[in-house]
């Protein structure tokens, strides 16, 4: 059944909510295991789902691109649950209390994952919009989950306001397209090229995408929301919201307007250049680790959309590979950040000084993740950027590749700030004394191994077969 992964996630969400009503405080950990089991089964269902098929008269379609996006969303949710365990159940050694209400927390998280999964299979504008709202509205609640923290409430309020504005842009654009065509199918807009009303609708949709994907100048909400949200939700926003924005942009730019995406190439290139440049430059002056990661995520959004400059059969696989590398690198880094925050309650970059002497393995994992995000070979981030830079170069945007290369150097400087604190500066007098929990240790080990292997495997394939690009197309079918 093509919709089985989505059904499993929804059923798991309802089961977690009901189970939480009957479990005592001592057995409350059961909702965590139920969430992990449901996501693991959903991942297995994704693997069992064919990459070709449709339901409901073509309104719900599974193809290779949607298949990979669904796998990314389930993986992101699974590791977010692992990152949240200690904080949800109050297993921290600092004065900061746990965020509590694990049953409701996991239910909301699972529902947003289900919305993301429906989004990539939608083939009409109604299902597309409803899925997008199901994917994003629960994030408002998650950002404001720490009720006793004024920053968390502020983050949730700002996210609601900006999210409502973005949804209004998107709904208005889709409504105009429906009014012009009288159809809700995503293919209906292909006949509207040249219509002034359609270009106005396209501008509305572009603004909505910019908010969801944190493209400049629609990025202003990100830093405050990232700073105020609980640390595991900040990690989830860094990866899942990026995946949602990319999936939505893919649906509009390739599915709805796929016949003439090249008309948008210059606009996409300008968005990419400005977004990655502002994100990296503003990150230089950030001291709070959450705000730093917010601007890091903004800069990576500019890198991601370079995949839309090339043809579908190369740009999309390159974007998907970089999304996989980005998820592994970002969540591996956040595993260390979550552990440090749980143990000390501190969130500034300066607080990580001397970490290599107190916990060398965690410092090593964080350093590898930072180098991967910066694009240092032979880690996965380098390979992913190589593919996306090749897409831009192949489309004739050599100036954009030059800007992206300069931004990679700026990003390396930014990430080396954290590495310097961990390896060169003296040990913090109030550093964490307890080692990472088993959940954070497993998460860190698995993701660090993944980001290393994803960088090495293409080089081996290139040495044997003479074509790294062929490896990309073979592993990530379009």
Image: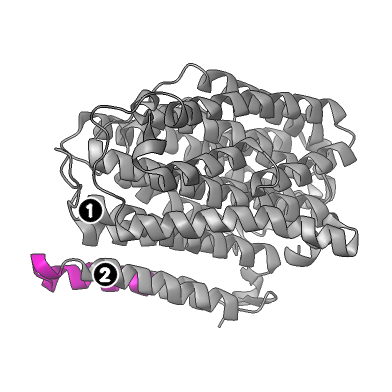
Frontmost of labels 1 and 2 is 1
The answer to which of 232 and 3 lies nearer the viewer is: 232
Residue 260, image x and y in percent?
Answer: 83, 45
Circle 1 residues within 10 Å: few <14, some 14–19, many ≥20: many
- Quick one: quadrant of the N terminus? bottom right
Snapshot colouring:
one colour
Q: Which mark is residue 88?
A: 1
Instruction: Let me know if residue 13 is in the magenta part.
Output: yes
Question: Disc count in the image?
Answer: 2
Query: In this view, which residue lies farthest toward the bottom?
Result: 1
Q: Which mark is residue 330?
A: none
Q: How much space separates mark 1 and mark 2, taking CA atoms?
A: 14 Å
135 up-or-down from 410: above or below: below
In percent of the image, x 91 and y 59: which residue is there?
466
Residue bounds of the magenta highlight: 10-27
**Label 2, on which residue?**
16
Q: Which secondary structure, mark 1?
A: helix
The answer to which of 137 and 450 lies nearer the viewer is: 450
Q: Quadrant of residue 406?
A: top right
- Asked whether residue 275 is in view, the answer is no
Residue 398, image x and y in percent?
Answer: 86, 30
- Asked whether residue 380 is in view, the answer is yes
Q: Magenta span: helix, strand or loop, mainly?
A: helix
Instruction: Let me know if residue 246 is in the magenta part.
Output: no
Q: Earlier in the sequence, mark 1 or mark 2?
A: 2
142 up-or-down from 402: above or below: below
Q: Is residue 32 left or right of residue 449?
A: left
- Quick one: quadrant of the C terminus? bottom right
Query: In this view, which residue lies farthest toward the top?
Result: 285
Circle 2 residues within 10 Å: few <14, some 14–19, many ≥20: many
Q: Which secondary structure, mark 2?
A: helix
In percent of the image, x 48 and y 47: which residue is there?
365
């Amino acid at each position: 059944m093509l919709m089985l992964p989505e059904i499993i996630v929804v059923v798991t969400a309802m089961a977690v909510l009901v189970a939480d009503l009957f479990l005592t405080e001592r057995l409350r950990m059961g909702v965590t295991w139920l969430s992990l089991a449901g996501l693991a089964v959903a991942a297995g269902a994704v693997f069992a789902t064919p990459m070709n098929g449709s339901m409901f008269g073509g309104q719900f379609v599974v193809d290779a691109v949607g298949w990979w996006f669904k796998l990314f969303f389930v993986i992101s949710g699974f590791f977010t649950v692992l990152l949240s365990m200690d904080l949800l159940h109050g297993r921290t050694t600092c004065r900061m209390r746990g965020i509590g209400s694990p049953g409701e927390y996991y239910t909301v998280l699972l529902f947003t994952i289900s919305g993301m999964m429906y989004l990539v299979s939608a083939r009409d504008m109604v299902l597309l919009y409803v899925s997008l709202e199901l994917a994003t509205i629960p994030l408002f609640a998650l950002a404001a989950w720490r009720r006793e923290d004024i920053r968390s409430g502020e983050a949730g309020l700002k996210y609601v306001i900006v999210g409502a504005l973005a949804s209004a842009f998107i709904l208005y654009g889709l409504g105009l397209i429906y009014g012009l065509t009288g159809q809700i199918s995503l293919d209906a807009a292909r006949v509207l090229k040249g219509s002034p009303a359609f270009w106005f609708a396209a501008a509305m949709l572009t603004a909505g995408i910019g908010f969801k994907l944190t493209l400049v100048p629609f990025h202003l909400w990100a830093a405050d929301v990232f700073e105020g949200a609980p640390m595991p939700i900040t990690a989830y926003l860094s990866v899942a919201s990026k995946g949602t924005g990319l999936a939505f942009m893919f649906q509009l730019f390739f599915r709805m307007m796929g016949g003439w995406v090249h008309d948008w190439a210059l606009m996409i290139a300008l968005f990419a250049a400005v977004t990655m440049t502002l994100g990296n430059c503003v990150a230089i002056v950030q001291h709070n680790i959450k705000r730093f990661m917010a601007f890091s995520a903004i800069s990576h959004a500019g890198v991601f959309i370079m995949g839309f400059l090339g043809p579908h059969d190369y740009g999309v696989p390159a974007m998907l590979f970089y999304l996989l590398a980005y998820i592994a690198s970002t969540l591996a880094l956040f595993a260390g950040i979550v552990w440090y925050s749980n143990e000390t309650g501190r969130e500034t970059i300066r607080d990580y000084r001397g970490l290599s002497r107190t916990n060398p393995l965690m410092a090593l994992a964080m350093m590898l993740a930072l180098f991967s995000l910066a694009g240092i070979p032979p880690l996965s981030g380098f390979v992913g950027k190589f593919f996306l830079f090749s897409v831009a170069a192949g489309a004739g945007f050599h100036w954009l590749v030059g800007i992206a290369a300069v931004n990679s150097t700026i990003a390396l400087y930014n990430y080396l700030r954290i590495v310097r604190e961990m390896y060169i500066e003296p040990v913090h007098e109030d550093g964490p004394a307890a080692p990472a929990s088993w959940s954070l240790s497993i998460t860190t080990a698995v993701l660090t191994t993944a980001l290393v292997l994803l960088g090495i495997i293409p080089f081996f394939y290139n040495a044997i077969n003479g074509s790294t690009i062929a490896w990309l197309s073979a592993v990530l079918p379009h």
